[in-house]
Image (tube, rainbow, N blue to C red):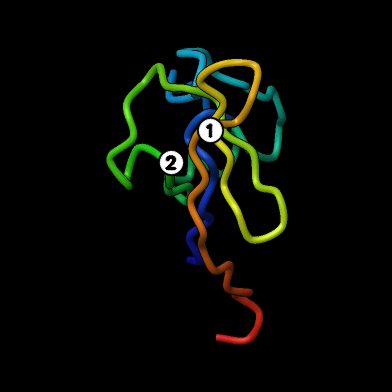
Amino acid sequence: MLKILVSSCLLGETVRYDGKNKLIENDILRLWVDQDRVISFCPEVSAGLPVPRTAAEIAGVMVLMCLTEQPVLRIKTEFVSLKNL
């Protein structure tokens, strides 16, 4: 049976930057969870970011973390498309 990777916050885990979740109620998702097909994953937490944490936005090839009203931390990164792997 194929496994399905789902963002942890969508499964109700409190891993978002604001310490909350974005639980979605969906019959198909619930069925997959009951069938043990779902793999819960949070890339931010897996990368070592804390919960709660400062909000961040992707702007082009930069990740902006806003510690004040002005972005003060810029991290250059490269985004990879999984469809080419």
Left or right side of 18 for 24: right
Residue 32 on image: x %, y %: 56, 44
Mark 1 highlights which residue? Answer: 65
Q: Is residue 74 above or below residue 26?
A: below
Residue 63 on image: x %, y %: 57, 47
Q: Is residue 12 above or below residue 31?
A: above
Q: Quadrant of residue 24?
A: top right
Q: Residues within 10 Å of mark 1 (few under 14, many from 20)?
A: some
- Looking at the image, which residue sits at the far bottom? 84
Q: Which marked residue is nearer to the observer: mark 1 or mark 2?
A: 1
Q: Quadrant of residue 80?
A: bottom right
Q: Is residue 62 above or below residue 72?
A: below
**Residue drawn at 52 percent across, 45 percent down:** 74
Residue 35 on image: x %, y %: 48, 45
Q: Quadrant of the C terminus?
A: bottom right
- Distance from Cα at disc 1 to Cα at disc 2: 18 Å
**Residue drawn at 35 percent across, 37 percent down:** 45
For the residue labelled by badge 2, is the local secondary structure a helix, a strand or a loop? loop
Residue type indicated by callout 2: Cys
Q: Residues within 10 Å of mark 2 (few under 14, many from 20)?
A: some
Left or right side of 79 for 25: right
Mark 2 highlights which residue? Answer: 42
Residue type indicated by callout 1: Met
Residue 2 on image: x %, y %: 51, 66
**Residue drawn at 64 percent across, 38 percent down:** 57
Q: Is residue 9 above or below residue 75?
A: above
**Residue drawn at 47 percent across, 34 percent down:** 8
Q: Which mark is residue 3?
A: none
